[in-house]
Amino acid sequence: MVQKSFVHFWQKPLLPSKVSLEVQKVNIIPPKINKIWVRELGSGSLRPGMRFKTGEIVRNDGLEVFVSPFTGSIVSVGEVKGYLNRQYTEIVLEKDDEEQISQDMETVLATKDPERILNYINLLPGELKFSVMPSNRKLDVIYISLMDEDPFTFGSQVFIKEFHKEIIEAISFLKELANRQVVVLPEDGSITLDTPGMEQVRIVPAYPHSLPQMIIKQISGKEISSRERLLDYGMAWLDINHLIVLGQVLFRKSVDIIRPLFIVENGSKPKFANAKIGMPFTHILESIRAENYRAIAINSLLKGLPLFSLDHPTLSHTCSVFLIPEEDIPEFVDHQCINCGECVKICPSRLPVNMLIRYLQNRRYEDAVKNFDLLSCMECGMCTYVCVAKIPIFHYIMLGKYEWQLIKEKEETDANA
Ligand code: SF4
Ligand code: SF4
């Protein structure tokens, strides 16, 4: 089957509902016991009692595995399963009252080498990653988006107000990284920011137009295949969460960073909380007196990670939390597809989603990739939103992509054996 380019502008974007800018600020007192999750690390040489300073590069069997976001000691090391059943190493840490800054951070910052600094920040626990070109090569273009990607939040407006200095510091640092920098802002004027010497582009703040691939297509005319990385095109995409983390490291010279959370709760004023990396969700919910919520989604309602256990820490990429009372949890069960066609009509990648879901439900991942273009899905989540049979299509897609990646990795390993 011809592999399609995935960007086709769908004519009816999901317009954000009118939101009030009123938010309630909540101050969360950091707990003594924190935890971090690191992908497939194994316990290796990490042992209870080991101590770390803030910003220290922690090594496991000689390999750099994470940067400690605070000063403290290991209480325990164990294995946990996360989204898509991925294996994580959970490190429970007790935080000291007094912060000690590691020499590692000072050494890295003193180099003023963007590649070293960004690679160091990439070691913070979580999935917020900066892509950098190999040494001495500049990116062609870096897109810096100040848009809310999810149509159900307006976190960016709040974050810009709260972290103005940090964001400006991060943007000026990024100037050196690319030949061209494009700052993307919403067309409605809800966000303004002075970014001297940088191009600003305004985009209709409607979903799925706010997705990176759609914006890049709109600005540059280039259709980026989902089979390749942006870096292969000499491009990088950063959003406000990257700016907040980078800005705090550069401006405050500490990685004990505030990980601001936009908390959306049905029927009440959204909250803005000063969480930190490592803070467990149970602690956050207790602090905002929302212990009765049983299910939450993080980062996005349409394509976020569903959490059915609150035994999860805040990580570098956690930016929004949606609290859903138990009785309001949408029923997602494997009803049969009734071929209504709604998912096909709405899909911006123009995929035969009704066919794709049949193959994914039957674990026919190879067919899904080769015959139904699974990898061209741009992960917008709209198909699940409209599915009348309430099939969790988006999560089947994410699982399918993950399983396909495992199949490819196994093939490579076998070929090299
Ligand atoms: S998530 Fe669904 S609607 Fe969105 S691109 Fe993928 S298949 Fe299409
Ligand atoms: S929206 Fe749901 S029921 Fe309708 S065709 Fe798509 S998968 Fe089937």
Image (spheres, rainbow, N blue to C red):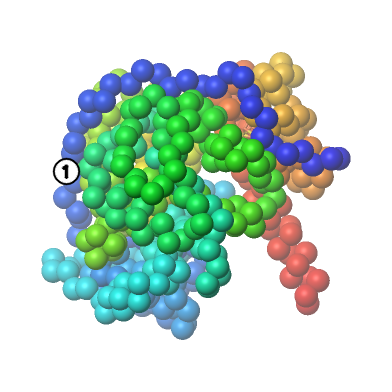
Q: Position of residue 402 (x, y in %)?
A: 64, 51
Query: Residue visible at 38% across and 49% down?
Result: 197
Query: Residue visible at 54% across and 59% down?
Result: 139
Q: Position of 174 compared to 209: left or right?
A: left
Q: Nearer the viewer, residue 2 or 279?
A: 2
Q: Position of 83 compared to 72: left or right?
A: right
Where, by quadrant of the figure, is residue 92 drawn? Answer: bottom left
Amino acid bearing label 1: Asn
Q: Position of residue 240 (x, y in %)?
A: 38, 45
Q: Position of residue 143 (x, y in %)?
A: 49, 47
Q: Nearer the viewer, residue 193 or 158?
A: 193
Mark 1, other Cα within 10 Å: few <14 / some 14–19 / many ≥20:
few
Total number of numbered labels? 1
Q: Is residue 233 above or below residue 370?
A: below
Residue at the limit of the structure toward the bottom, as seen here:
62
Query: Residue visible at 48% across and 39% down?
Result: 304
Q: Position of residue 321 (x, y in %)?
A: 36, 38
Residue ID for mark 1: 27
Query: Residue visible at 50% across and 52% down?
Result: 180
Looking at the rendered image, the quarter that the C terminus falls into is bottom right
Q: Nearer the viewer, residue 145 or 100?
A: 145
Label 1 beta carbon within 8 A of ligand 1: no
Q: Is residue 77 visible?
A: no
Query: In what element is the residue under mark 1?
Result: loop
